[in-house]
Image: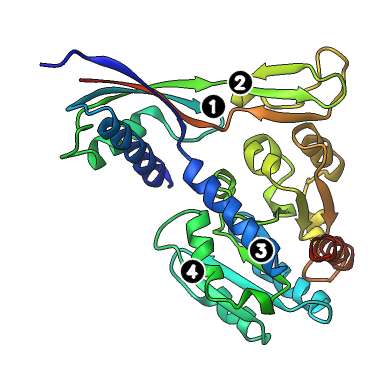
């Protein structure tokens, strides 16, 4: 699936920042990934280990935080957080409206890295 | 040895793709070409719907097709047999198209000579939803045999698409698919989504869908 292009992008961004900050080794990378992404932590790390070989980021640990799925009510604008697997037959708890829009849960965001 | 330090990055991984997609949209605006990204699972009827749509709109617009397939040219050949320019992108195992691949596909067209280009994305309800292709609108097909529970299983696909074509409605009597339940599930994720019920086989509903697309294209070309 598309783990490789996503991981390649993470590595490119990290190496770019490593160069700008003149670091010699990246220890860990903090990521925020939306819960709707089907990419599993274990596989992301394995792919990362594979493509980062021989770079400054070789051996870096991915610290992945999942950002929750948040829907917004089209009627009263209430924001409703929920688990990805629970998106079944939802109504707004505030006003009972059924028209909801996804506002968070699909991002791939690199927050920071620890390096020396 | 240097101390370990925390370096702020704050970058979106897909930002390159988003930037390129925005550039494609700019290019399309300049050449007056409406680009539609059509997504669906394998076998939902993407190629058949494209062919039916071409039949309806070829009198009004100069139409082209970009076909994405992991490793075949079957779909492109079918479309080309209608006398429509079709460009085949072999994705070589990739499960989706991204903006860079679409840009390559568009380069094969003289965009000034095309009003409407339809992308047939890779058959998959998961990955294509994550990558902006630069299209003006996203369309998706759900076929009746796939079931009315798909918005629950693939909410991202349903939330990024502007329009849903429910295909193979000629199977309705043979399946426990409930159209009212489907529509309610869709509205809960994407209240703005337009929904059309069609059968590419019998032709039912095709005109209403083609009229919707016609309206979008003519509004964009104005």
* Distance between the alpha carbons at the discs numbered 1 and 4: 31 Å
Q: Are marks 2 and 3 in contact (CB under 8 Å)?
A: no
Q: Which residue is mark 1?
A: A35
Which percent across, then down, holds residue B123? 56, 57
* Distance between the alpha carbons at the discs numbered 4 and 2: 36 Å
* Distance between the alpha carbons at the discs numbered 1 and 3: 33 Å
Q: Nearer the viewer, mark 3 or mark 4?
A: 3
Q: Is residue B45 visible?
A: no
- B1 with respect to B74 (left or right): left
Q: Nearer the viewer, mark 4 or mark 2?
A: 4
The subunit carrying tag 2 is A
Q: Does A60 appear above or below B119?
A: above
Q: Nearer the viewer, mark 1 or mark 2?
A: 1
The subunit carrying tag 1 is A
Q: Secondary structure at mark 2?
A: loop
Q: Is residue B183 or residue B217 the one in the foreground?
A: B217
Q: Same chain for the residues at labels 3 and 4, yes or no?
A: yes
* Distance between the alpha carbons at the discs numbered 2 and 3: 38 Å
Q: Nearer the viewer, mark 2 or mark 3?
A: 3
Q: Secondary structure at mark 1?
A: loop
* Distance between the alpha carbons at the discs numbered 3 and 4: 19 Å
| Count of numbered labels shown in the rendering | 4
The subunit carrying tag 3 is B
Q: Residue at x 81, y 18 (%)?
A: A92
Instruction: Give the image quarter of residue A28.
Output: top left
Dot 3 or dot 4: first in sequence order is 3
Q: Residue at x 54, y 47 (%)?
A: B19
Q: Are marks 1 and 3 in contact (CB under 8 Å)?
A: no
Q: Secondary structure at mark 3?
A: helix
Q: Which residue is mark 4?
A: B89
């Amino acid at each position: 699936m598309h783990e490789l292009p996503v991981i390649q992008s993470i590595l490119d961004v990290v190496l770019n920042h490593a160069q700008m900050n003149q670091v010699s080794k990246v220890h860990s990378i903090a990521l925020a990934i939306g819960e709707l992404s089907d990419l599993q932590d274990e596989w992301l790390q394995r792919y990362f280990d594979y493509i980062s070989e021989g770079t400054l980021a070789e051996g870096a640990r991915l610290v992945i935080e999942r950002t929750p799925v948040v829907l917004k009510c089209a009627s009263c604008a209430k924001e409703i957080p929920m688990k990805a697997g629970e998106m079944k037959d939802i109504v707004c708890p505030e006003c009972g409206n059924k028209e909801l829009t996804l506002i968070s849960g699909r991002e791939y965001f690199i927050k920071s890295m620890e390096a020396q | 040895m240097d101390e370990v330090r925390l370096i702020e990055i704050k970058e979106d991984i897909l930002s390159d793709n988003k930037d390129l997609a925005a550039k494609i949209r700019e290019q399309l605006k300049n050449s007056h070409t409406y680009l539609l990204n059509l997504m669906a699972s394998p076998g939902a009827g993407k190629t058949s719907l494209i062919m039916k749509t071409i039949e309806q709109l070829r009198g009004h617009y100069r139409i082209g097709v970009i076909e994405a397939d992991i490793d075949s040219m079957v779909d492109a050949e079918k479309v080309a047999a209608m006398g429509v320019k079709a460009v085949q992108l072999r994705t070589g195992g990739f499960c989706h198209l991204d903006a860079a691949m679409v840009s390559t596909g568009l380069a094969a067209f003289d965009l000034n000579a095309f009003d409407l280009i339809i992308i047939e994305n890779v058959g998959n309800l998961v990955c294509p939803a994550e990558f902006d292709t630069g299209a003006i609108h996203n369309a998706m097909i759900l076929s009746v045999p796939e079931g009315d529970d798909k918005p629950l299983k693939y909410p991202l696909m349903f939330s990024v698409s502007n329009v849903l074509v429910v295909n193979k409605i000629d199977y309705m009597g043979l399946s426990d698919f409930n159209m009212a339940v489907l529509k309610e599930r869709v509205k809960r994720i994407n209240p703005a989504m337009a929904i059309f019920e069609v059968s590419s086989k019998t032709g039912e509903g095709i005109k209403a869908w083609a009229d919707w697309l016609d309206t979008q294209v003519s509004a964009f070309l104005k």
